[in-house]
Image: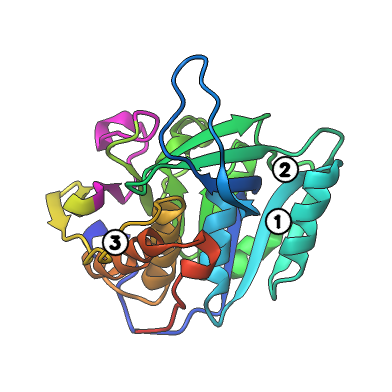
């Protein structure tokens, strides 16, 4: 790709196949009056559970499209793993899930009255590995892949996709792989994701850093530009999954052939939709070709 400002740009098309590589956690989300102080006991109101995590939320956003979606992940052998596998299997997607002899990762999400979320992760996220018996050749037939996995060899295989988007949280994996991503996406406000092009020995075509209500910035070899935030809902109910829904929509719009700046503007609408709640999966918007 010669000019990352036009990543994905070309004749507008309707993508037919995507893949997501990453973890899907068992999420319990509920409201609290305030975050607990040391020694406090707080009550979780209106708790609900759903499959989430960086891979899960992006996957469910892409499932809201007309495309065939493949998910490459791993699940534990306990009740949480079985529940996640059942919910994934109930979608129209093609799920490739390795079994791990371990408890499935759980997330406890506490939402305060202002809509901010705090996450407690229980256990290590489970990921697909290159030695799992999975159809890795699917990547070569996809219009777009979003990668938030842990295996550098899987990332190398994913590079066969027409458009490859990688989470900035997987910077170390991207560096080990030697792969050039088309776009790396992260939150400028998350210390585990905030980065610059200079942090990548093999620079991606573009680096997108989201900044919440301030929109975000796009860095390429040609310089840095900004895209605006989408209008916020009248009341912010929650924020869990907003960034993941943004990146799922961004991957979709890039595969549709839109220039990167326009894809970011459209994807921002999908991220902002999650702020309205009440639950993340129900708040995600459908994806359609522009």
Helix, strand or loop at disc 3? loop
Is residue 276 located in the magenta-colored stretch of the structure? no
Please report the residue visible at 26 percent of the width from the left and 57 percent of the height from the top. Answer: 4
Specify the quadrant that holds the C terminus.
bottom left
| Residue that mark 1 sits on | 136
User: How far is mark 3 from mark 1, CA to CA?
Assistant: 43 Å
- Name the spot of residue 205 as percent of width and height, x first: 31, 51
Residue 200 drawn in magenta = yes
For the image, the number of numbered tags is 3
- Residue in view at x 44 percent, y 34 percent: 171
Magenta-drawn segment? 191-212
Q: Which residue is mark 2?
A: 130
Q: Return the residue nearer the eye: 89 or 147.
A: 89
Q: Is residue 73 above or below residue 177?
A: below
Residue wearing tag 3? 235
* Residue found 59% across the figure and 42% down from its top: 149
Measure the C-alpha gap from mark 3 to mark 2: 44 Å
Specify whether residue 3 is in view. no
């Amino acid at each position: 790709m010669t000019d990352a400002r036009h990543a994905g740009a070309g004749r507008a098309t309707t993508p037919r196949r995507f893949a997501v590589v990453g973890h899907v956690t068992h999420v319990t989300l509920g409201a609290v009056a305030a975050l607990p102080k040391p020694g406090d006991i707080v009550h979780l109101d209106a708790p609900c559970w759903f499959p989430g995590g960086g891979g899960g939320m992006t996957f469910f956003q892409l499932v809201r499209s007309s495309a065939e979606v493949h998910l490459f992940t791993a699940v534990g052998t306990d009740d949480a793993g079985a529940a996640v596998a059942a919910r994934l299997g109930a979608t129209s997607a093609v799920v490739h899930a390795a079994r791990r002899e371990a408890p499935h990762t759980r997330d406890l999400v506490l939402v305060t009255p202002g809509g901010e979320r705090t996450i407690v992760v229980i256990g290590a996220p489970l990921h697909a590995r290159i030695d799992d018996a999975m159809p890795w050749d699917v990547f070569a037939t996809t219009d777009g892949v979003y990668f938030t996995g842990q295996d550098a060899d899987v990332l190398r295989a994913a590079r066969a996709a027409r458009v490859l988007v990688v989470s900035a949280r997987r910077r170390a994996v991207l560096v080990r792989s030697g792969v050039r991503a088309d776009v790396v996406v992260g939150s400028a406000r998350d210390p585990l994701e905030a980065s610059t092009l200079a942090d990548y020995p093999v620079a991606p075509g573009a680096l997108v850093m989201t900044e919440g209500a301030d929109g975000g910035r796009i860095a390429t070899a040609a310089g840095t530009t900004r895209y605006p935030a989408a209008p916020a809902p009248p009341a912010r109910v929650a924020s869990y999954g907003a960034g993941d829904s943004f990146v799922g929509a961004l991957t979709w719009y890039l595969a549709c052939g839109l220039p990167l700046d326009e894809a970011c503007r459209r994807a921002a609408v999908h991220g902002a939709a999650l702020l309205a709640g009440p639950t993340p999966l129900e708040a995600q918007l459908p994806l359609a070709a522009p």
